[in-house]
Structure formats: C-alpha cells, structure tokens
Image (cartoon, grey):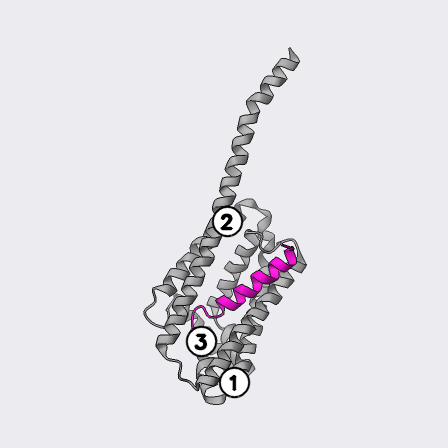
C-alpha cells in the first residue's frame, strides 16, 4: 500500500474508533446538549472537539518524530504502546459504569475549569474545543498513539506528506464519529440510556484489544524475522571463514 494512503487510512480509523474511548466529557456533552438543542448544536460541539483533537494529533507527530532516530527509543515505544493499548482495552471492556476514572481526571478537571473561566465559551463550537483543550488524557493518548503509528511504520516518521495525511485522516474520522453521534442523539431525543453507553464503551474496549493484538502480532513477526536473519548470519560465518582459509592456503 502507498505510504500516504496507509497513513491516511490509519489516521481515519484511529480517529473514528478512539473518539468514543472513553465515553468522556465531549461525548456526554453532545448527548446532553443534542437532546435539548438539536442536531446542529450537537454537531458544532463535535466540530470544535474534532478541531482540538486534530491540533493535539498534529503536535504529537511533529514534536516526537525525531525520537525515532534512535533504535532503542523505537523499540521501547513499540513494546510500551502494545502494553498501554491492551491495558486501556481491558479497562474499558471490564468497566461497570460509563465513566472510567483515571489518575488524570482530577488534573484535567482543574485545567478545564481554569480554561472555561478564561475563555467563557458561549458557542457550541468553543464548548467542544475547550472541553478537549482541558483534557490531558486526550493529549497523552494522541502522543502514545502517534508514537506507535510511527514506530510500527504505519506512518513514515521522515515523510511530511504521510504525517499530514494521517492528521487529515484523524480529522475526518473524528468528525465522522461526532456527526453520527449528534444525529443519533437528535433522532432519539435523549433516550440513550446509560446501559447503551456502557455497551458502547465495552465495544470500544474490544476495538482497543483487537488493535493491541495487531500490534503484538506485528512485533512477533518482526522478532521472528530478526531471529531468522541473525541465524543465517551465524550459519554463513563459519563457511565464509573456511573458504577464506582455503583461499589463503
């Protein structure tokens, strides 16, 4: 697959799937506001949230791509990302309530409160924008995800076009999710129950686990390929040494 197309597809599906993980402030705001004010208002909240997520994603790609010049850092991110994705997947799959608390929640709430007091969002777009701006978990998630996409060569760390295509795919994917959610809320008139949201969160956990298993499979194939290559080098070394000895004699 062409690197630009691969990066765009990776960004799209990451944005589409991970926008619903977890069912956090933005999604809950869309559910509440969409039920009261309709599709357009909920959609504008989603557009604002998507804009800020795209900025965080772009920052993650541009700020950390130079780290992959070091092989140790790349290997660490591959293994660490595999563990992190699986951890989140099982955490959301086994959740018993819609809100899954994390250690960043308290810090995010304080930051979000500060931002809201500073910007005083009056429009739906700015409401969604500031909700993501104050969510430290979103920034951390995109840093880890961008690092993993580059570490596994799904996005070429040395190609500006590939990174731009991935960021564009993320923007399209997040907007697709928020548009679908806004439409569903406006059509159901707020009848989405917490049980349905919990099922959605469980589905998101399953998607994360599948994504983690894909990463793990790729890691295993890379290790197996490296092992075969190393074995061939060791097998050819004695034969080469013997041929050199015969030639010299």
Nearest to viewer (mark 3 / mark 2): 2
Q: Position of residue 12 (x, y in %)?
A: 57, 65
Q: Name above or below for residue 87 compared with residue 23.
A: above
Provide residue 241's location: percent of width, then percent of height: 59, 20
Q: Look at the numbered disc 2 and give the secondary structure of its residue.
A: helix
**Secondary structure under the numbered disc 1 in the rendered image:** helix
Magenta region: 1-25
Q: Quadrant of residue 240?
A: top right
Q: Nearer the viewer, residue 160 or 140?
A: 160
Residue farthest toward the bottom in the current orientation of the protein: 37
Q: Mark 3 or mark 2: name the one nearer the start of the chain.
A: 3
Q: Which residue is mark 2?
A: 218
Q: Main secondary structure of the magenta part?
A: helix
Which-is-in-front pick, marks 1 and 3?
1
Sort mark 3 into few (<14), some (14-19) or many (20+) by Cα contacts within 10 Å.
Answer: some
Q: Whole-percent x and y of residue 3?
A: 64, 55
Residue 28: give x, y in percent of width and height.
43, 78
Cα separation between marks 1 and 3: 18 Å
Q: Earlier in the sequence, mark 2 or mark 1?
A: 1
Residue at 52%, 85% in the rendered image = 39
Q: How many marks overall?
A: 3
Please determine whether, in this image, residue 108 is positioned above or below residue 247: below
* Quadrant into which the C terminus falls: top right
Residue 205 seen by the camera: yes
Query: Mark 3 highlights which residue?
Result: 25
| Magenta span includes 133 | no
| Residue 24 belongs to the span the image colors magenta | yes
Q: Which residue does the numbered mark 1 point to in the structure image?
A: 39
């Amino acid at each position: 697959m062409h690197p630009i197309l691969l990066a765009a597809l990776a960004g799209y599906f990451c944005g589409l799937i991970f926008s619903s993980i977890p069912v956090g402030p933005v999604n809950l705001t869309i559910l509440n506001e969409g039920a009261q004010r309709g599709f357009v208002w909920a959609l504008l909240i989603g557009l604002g949230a998507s804009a800020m997520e795209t900025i965080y994603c772009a920052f993650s790609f541009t700020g950390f791509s130079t780290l992959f010049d070091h092989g140790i850092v790349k290997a660490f991110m591959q293994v660490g990302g595999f563990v992190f994705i699986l951890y989140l997947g099982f955490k959301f799959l086994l959740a018993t309530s819609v809100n899954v608390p994390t250690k960043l929640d308290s810090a995010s709430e304080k930051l979000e409160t500060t931002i809201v007091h500073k910007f005083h969002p009056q429009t739906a777009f700015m409401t969604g924008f500031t909700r993501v701006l104050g969510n430290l978990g979103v920034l951390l998630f995109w840093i880890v995800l961008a690092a993993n996409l580059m570490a596994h060569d799904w996005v070429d760390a040395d190609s500006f076009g590939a990174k731009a295509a991935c960021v564009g795919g993320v923007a399209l994917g997040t907007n697709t999710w928020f548009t679908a959610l806004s439409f569903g809320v406006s059509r159901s008139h707020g009848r989405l129950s917490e049980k349905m949201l919990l099922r959605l969160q469980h589905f998101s956990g399953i998607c994360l686990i599948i994504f983690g298993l894909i990463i793990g499979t790729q890691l295993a194939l890379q290790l197996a390929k490296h092992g075969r290559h190393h074995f061939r080098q060791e097998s050819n070394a004695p034969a080469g040494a013997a041929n050199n000895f015969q030639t010299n004699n």
